[in-house]
Image (cartoon, grey):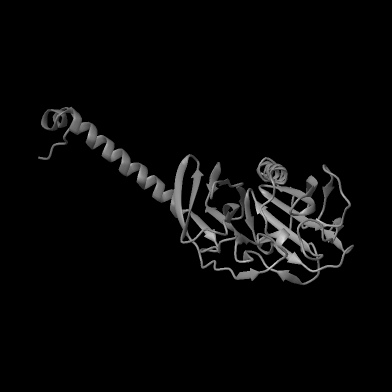
Amino acid sequence: MRRSIGPGVLTRALGPWCVVGVLIGHAVVAVRAVEAQATRRVQTEPASPRPGTVFRVRVAGESRAVSGRVAGEPLHFVRDSVGWSAWAAAPVDSSGRLAALVVIDGDTARLSVALSAGAYRVDRLRVAPQFGRDPDSATAARIAREFAAAKAVSRGAHETPALFAGAFVRPRASRVTSGFGTAREFNGAITSRHTGVDFAGAIGAPVRAAQRGVVRLVGDFYYAGRVVYVDHGAGFVTAYFHLSRVRVVEGDTVVAGSVLGEVGATGRVTGPHLHFVARYGEISVDGRTLPGWR
């Protein structure tokens, strides 16, 4: 006849601290089992995102509440036909695998998302000497203020509910003259990365909003010239640089295709064009990967 071994027998046989260790071990195994079950419900689309793009995080099945973070940015889950889904972003300089955390009804799923190859072209440029010098202290302070203002828009977009519906559209119908992610080496000394998409255009040509949103920032920046930042909610922001003229003011609500301003050559540029920026939170992404881009 088999007998079950109760806690008292274990305590006498193994000692109290051994029993605690056994119970903790069982608890750890149980927690890991729950996490594994939660993780099996989560998938990314595509399965291996490219650095510098947005991608979907999907949770299958019924759940009461879902939240999460990827690359330090919160996810904004909404119900869909198969469960829940949210957009996320892979930083352009990331490689290998990207950590993601999703909480499903209090159960935590930890994922390691494999990234596809994200190699971007390197351009070696020579420009006029004044474009290669470090800014003086007053200019550096100005740049820092402008950076902080843009960063505040990115953070605030997580507090704004999704304002967009349908596809994000091109801000210009013209050709792309410089793609996203290109590494730039200036005069063999200054290295940067092109974290936007450049569209051709003559001075005065219209620049249009990529989607519905609220104009959060209009300014005249040192590097970017005349700018407009639009908060689309749910973490998404687009920005439009080097404008010759701005046709909106802060607080305006715009829709996809609304004219925001006109192509220009303001700021530190060598000729007229639109530099189009897309961000998820503070992560810059290729605007051509925004939801439904056309």
User: Where does the image place residue 214, in percent across and percent down from the top left?
Assistant: 79, 46
Residue 183 appearing in the image: no
Number of marks present in the image shown: 0
> Nearest the camera: 267 or 204?
267
Seen in the image, is 285 located left or right of residue 27? right
> Nearest the camera: 48 or 195?
195
User: Where does the image place residue 213, in percent across and percent down from the top left?
Assistant: 77, 49
User: Where does the image place residue 129, in percent across and percent down from the top left?
Assistant: 71, 62
Which image quadrant is residue 178 in?
bottom right
Which image quadrant is residue 292 in?
bottom right
> Nearest the camera: 132 or 215?
132
Name which residue lies at 45% across and 48% down: 109
Name which residue lies at 16% across and 27% down: 8
Query: Where is the C terminus found, in terms of image quarters?
Result: bottom right
> Nearest the camera: 82 or 266?
266
Q: Is residue 136 above or below residue 8?
A: below
Name which residue lies at 60% across and 47% down: 77
Seen in the image, is 31 located left or right of residue 278? left
User: Where does the image place residue 151, in percent across and percent down from the top left?
Assistant: 67, 44
Residue 13 appearing in the image: yes
Query: Where is the N terminus found, in terms of image quarters?
Result: top left
Q: Is residue 271 above or below residue 88?
A: below
Seen in the image, is 137 located left or right of residue 191? right
